Amino acid sequence: MARYEIYVTYKKGIFDPPGATAKRALDNLGYAGIEDVKIGKYIQMTGDMSEATVREMCEKLLANPVIEDFRIETVEEA
Amino acid sequence: MARYEIYVTYKKGIFDPPGATAKRALDNLGYAGIEDVKIGKYIQMTGDMSEATVREMCEKLLANPVIEDFRIETVEEA
């Protein structure tokens, strides 16, 4: 059984709506000094598949390659 | 300038709708052998605030402590 962790983030320069909303809300709550907030996805996946297959899943479904980058970490090998 | 990475995940036993949807979609695309998919949030934050303040932000706004756990990693100290 393999275990992967995938980090999906907006590409540099692409507007990040959840991050911008969280930053504004935190500013409004009175927190000072926040420079930047970015919100991406943290995906944990287990199963009998290779890292190459997980990469394909990311490209096809889990990330939007037009606006998002992703990074796969293999926590346990298949 | 401090830099933090925050991982927000559903608590054990709490239903994870985006994870369940992704698993079903991947099954439908023909990928075999997937055991489990969980989708949480990956938050990157920079600014002049302490880890204790970031913890408070998580409890108040960034995570829902009723159904979610969070883990903070300090990438760069303030």
Image (cartoon, coloured by chain):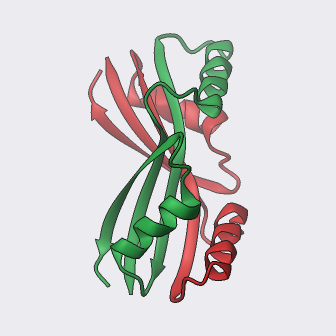
Chain colours: A red, B green
* A14 up-or-down from B26: above or below: below
Is residue B42 at least partly visible in the picture? yes
Which residue lies at the image location 59% right of the left edge and 22% below the top edge? B23
**For residue A3, what is the image quadrant?**
top left
Quadrant (top left, top right, bottom left, bottom right) of the N terminus of chain B: bottom left
Residue A47 coordinates in the image, percent (x, y):
41, 18
* B55 up-or-down from B68: above or below: below
Quadrant (top left, top right, bottom left, bottom right) of the C terminus of chain B: bottom left
Which residue lies at the image location 28% right of the left edge and 80% below the top edge? B77
Which residue lies at the image location 62% right of the left edge and 21% below the top edge? B26
* B53 up-or-down from A47: above or below: below
Residue B7 coordinates in the image, percent (x, y):
43, 52
State the residue in front, A20 or A49: A20
Is residue A9 at least partly visible in the picture? no
Is residue A16 rendered to the left or right of residue A51?
right
Residue A61 coordinates in the image, percent (x, y):
66, 34
Which residue lies at the image location 50% right of the left edge and 48% below the top edge? B65
